[in-house]
Amino acid sequence: MKHLYKKTMMIALMMVTMTVAHASDAFSHTVLLLLDNPQNKEAWSQTITSQEEWETFYYAPLMYMSPVVGSGYERPIAPKFDFEKYQILIGGLGVKFAENLGAEHTLFVEKVIEEENEIVVYVLSISPDLNCLSSSDEIDGFPSYPTATVLVKKTDKPFKIKVSKLIETECP
């Protein structure tokens, strides 16, 4: 009887382990790099589901750049994606300031996991040490707009973003 109990417990544990492993599978994704980050002052997020939405978003930060005649500058072309199969998730922390130009705040997409009822995007927020930061006064500091952009397969599940923080201890 004792042997049967142990065997039943092992089978139950294996079933729970398989269910948990299946419930949190890695979700296929590609991190996209933008030519320039949107300069939103507040934290934000957006889901893009069409090429038209993507191009509007992609070109918006570049509107302030005007090419000099004869410079050879050509406007970059927004990458094309199959929005029948994919969607783009974008988010940012809003404006952040640093005393030194190289002491920027950045976002790094660590992984994307599919849970039973949602997709979880794990993001690492890397910030300079407090000694490298300004008083958040635009005149005194260098602004940065930390943003993360990820291409994921299309799903009806809602997205949740989990942010971990890392503080760089050395100033540039």
Image (spheres, rainbow, N blue to C red):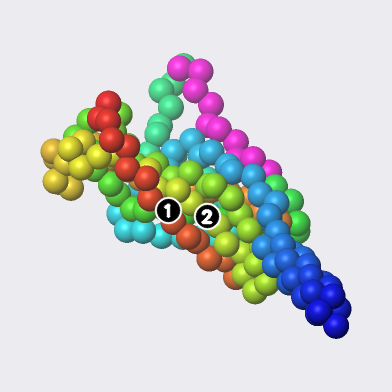
Crowd around label 2: few <14 · some 14–19 · many ≥20 (10 Å): some
Q: Amino acid at mark 2?
A: Tyr
Q: Amino acid at mark 1?
A: Ser
Quarter of the view holding residue 71: top left
Residue 79 on image: x %, y %: 64, 40
Question: Can you see residue 140?
Answer: yes
Quarter of the view holding residue 141: top left
Give the residue displayed 30% in from the left and 29% down from the top.
102
Residue 122 is tagged as 2
Q: Main secondary structure of the magenta part?
A: loop
Label 2: state its secondary structure.
Answer: strand
Quarter in which the N terminus is drawn: bottom right
Residue tagged 1: 164
Crowd around label 1: few <14 · some 14–19 · many ≥20 (10 Å): few
The answer to which of 29 and 60 lies nearer the viewer is 29
Give the residue displayed 54% in from the left and 47% down from the top.
110
Pick whichever of labels 1 and 2 is earlier in the sequence: 2
Position of 164 with respect to 49 (left or right) is: left
The answer to which of 136 and 51 lies nearer the viewer is 136
Q: Is residue 12 above or below residue 65?
A: below
Give the residue displayed 79% in from the left and 74% down from the top.
6
Quarter in which the C terminus is drawn: top left
Which residues lie in the magenta part?
71-80
Taking the magenta stretch, the answer to whether it contains residue 171 is no
